Amino acid sequence: MNENSQLTLNMYQKNINAALKSLMSDKPYLREDVCEAMEYSLMAGGKRLRPILMMEFCRMCGGNAAEVLDISLSIELIHTFSLIHDDLPCMDDDDYRRGKPSCHKKFGEAIALLAGDALNTLAFEVISNAAIDEKISAQAAVMLTSVLSKAVGVNGMIGGQVIDLSAEGKQISLEQLDLLQQNKTGALIEAACVMGVILAGRYELISAAAEYANALGRAFQIVDDILDVTGSFEELGKPIGSDTQQQKSTYVTALGIDGAQAEADRLTQSALTVLKQFDDCEFLTDLTVDLLHRRS
């Protein structure tokens, strides 16, 4: 990533982190525990990829990224809710996330479950408040809510998790694996890109944003699968080899490491080709390539 792109990435992450911290500043009496659990997981780190994608697509489509910062938090709230729930013993049963104890290890399963639920509902409160405060139109709020809620539900992230759970201990086809990851990982990434286009009012570019996101989301997941085999706890902040331990079908088990890497390369090139339809896409081009070669 070139110096200008790195500075842009740092700026986005700094602004998102500050806005998340501000959003979690209110901790109502007798509900402090769940608020602290929400903040703990939100502020544990992370790339902030999804809100960055939302703001950047808004900017590339002629909108003002800074003006939609608060709205972009909605998708990070959903993403964090999914991580809290994924780590629970009834799901992937992971004790660490981003180098720290998982939410349920720190606060207990009940509070972790409720913290995830609260982050889920807060995401839609953020969008509706933006309309109430006249930062966006009511029509835009309805469109954003529709896109995000579908990305979370049975035809999105939750549906993907269900397929993932049912596939444990089985070898599934590459077609089924694509469907699993398109829902579990790809749906939120697609929602982020499409929501950015909606915020800019460039509805004719929604299909291009979705096409880019579909390729990026699959490449992103393939790299995750490779890192689960080749990475380290220090790099990833979570135990390595958990996919193998849980007998999950991954792109590595389906294609081998070399085949998976080749497919990630191909998908990244597809994403970059679609990205050329958008103006001033240098930063997102750099970020897309950087995600392919990441080590965490």
Image (cartoon, rainbow, N blue to C red):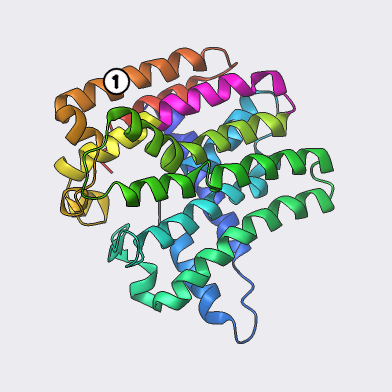
Nearer to the camera, 179 or 52: 179
Residue found 37% across the figure and 72% down from its top: 104
Nearer to the camera, 241 or 67: 241
Q: Is residue 2 visible?
A: no
**Residue 257 drawn at (x, y percent):** 16, 30
| Location of residue 224 by image quarter | top left
Rendered view: 20 above or below 188: below
Magenta stretch: helix, strand or loop mostly: helix
Rendered view: 176 above or below 247: above
Residue found 76% across the figure and 43% down from its top: 142
Judge left or right: residue 258 versus residue 4: left
Which residue corresponds to mark 1? Answer: 265
Q: Is residue 188 visible?
A: yes
Judge left or right: residue 2 versus residue 131: left
Rendered view: 39 above or below 275: below
Magenta span has 210?
A: yes
**Residue 20 drawn at (x, y percent):** 57, 58
**Residue 247 drawn at (x, y percent):** 19, 49
| Location of residue 65 by image quarter | top right
Residue found 45% across the figure and 68% down from its top: 40
Magenta region, residue range: 201-217
**Image quarter hosting the C terminus:** top left
**Image quarter hosting the N terminus:** top left
Q: Residues within 10 Å of mark 1 (few under 14, many from 20)?
A: some
Magenta span has 84?
A: no
